Image (cartoon, rainbow, N blue to C red):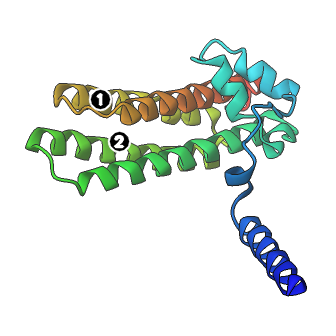
Amino acid sequence: MASTNQLCLVLVIFFLVFSLSSLSTSAIIPKANVSLSIPSSQLVENLCNGKAIQDRGFCLKALSTPEVIAAMDTTQLGTLIMKLGAANAKARLNVYNEIIKKPGSPQALKALNCCVEAYKYAILSFEMVSSELVEDPKSANYDVAVIGPEISNCEKELINAKVQAHQLLAGNRFMKYYVSMGYEITSTLELENPNEY
């Protein structure tokens, strides 16, 4: 009889261990607050210290991926920044599209639609700038700079409509940081190749 109880106990323990192992580790082991950031390349350091950068810490963190760190020149870094900006704009656009589906006032809907258009514009601009970096950094610089006023207009509309969504305003702030990084990198490309354009 004792061996049957021991067998049942072993099976219960095995089952518990097996079922817990299928959960994510964060549910079992709390995540440690340890920074594993990759040191920035000199290109990233120079960019994030630029005059146009609105938040150096954000710049360094956003550009700490291995792909960005491995960028060999300003053009490669610029292309990666534009990809990051476009990806961020797409994520923000999805948030706005989800919020629009919820009931709200006509003023809020108008403001949210304004933001949807601003983010569609941002996506197209970041993607267009990627292709302009080599051939025409001056146009790329202008095209990335005009994203900022679109996002500012979105913010203004949200505030005027009294849309209480701090995540939206934070997302707009982050988008402005990507715009500032894009502006800084395209300005750098213009200075690196002054006679080519």
> Would residue 113 appear left or right of 25 to someone viewing this image?
left
Identify the amino acid type marked 1: Asn
Disc 2 to disc 1, C-alpha distance: 8 Å
Check if mark 2's residue and mark 1's residue have beta carbons within 8 Å.
Answer: yes
Number of numbered discs visible in the structure rendering: 2
**Circle 1 Cα neighbour tier, 10 Å, few/some/many (<14 / 14–19 / ≥20):** some
Q: Secondary structure at mark 2?
A: helix
Q: Position of residue 63 (x, y in %)?
A: 73, 34
Q: Which mark is residue 197?
A: none
Identify the amino acid type marked 2: Ala
- The residue lying at 84 percent from left, 28 percent from top is 40
**Above or below: residue 62 compared with residue 17:** above
Quarter of the image where the N terminus is located? bottom right
Pick the residue in front: 26 or 130: 26
* Residue 142 seen in the current view: no
Q: Position of residue 73 (x, y in %)?
A: 84, 36
Q: Which mark is residue 153?
A: 1
Query: Outermost residue, left direction?
Result: 106
- The residue lying at 18 percent from left, 26 percent from top is 160
Pick the residue in front: 40 or 14: 14
Q: Secondary structure at mark 1?
A: helix
> Would residue 163 appear left or right of 166 to someone viewing this image?
left
**Above or below: residue 68 compared with residue 120:** above
- The residue lying at 66 percent from left, 18 percent from top is 56
Mark 2 sits on what residue? Answer: 118
Pick the residue in front: 98 or 53: 98
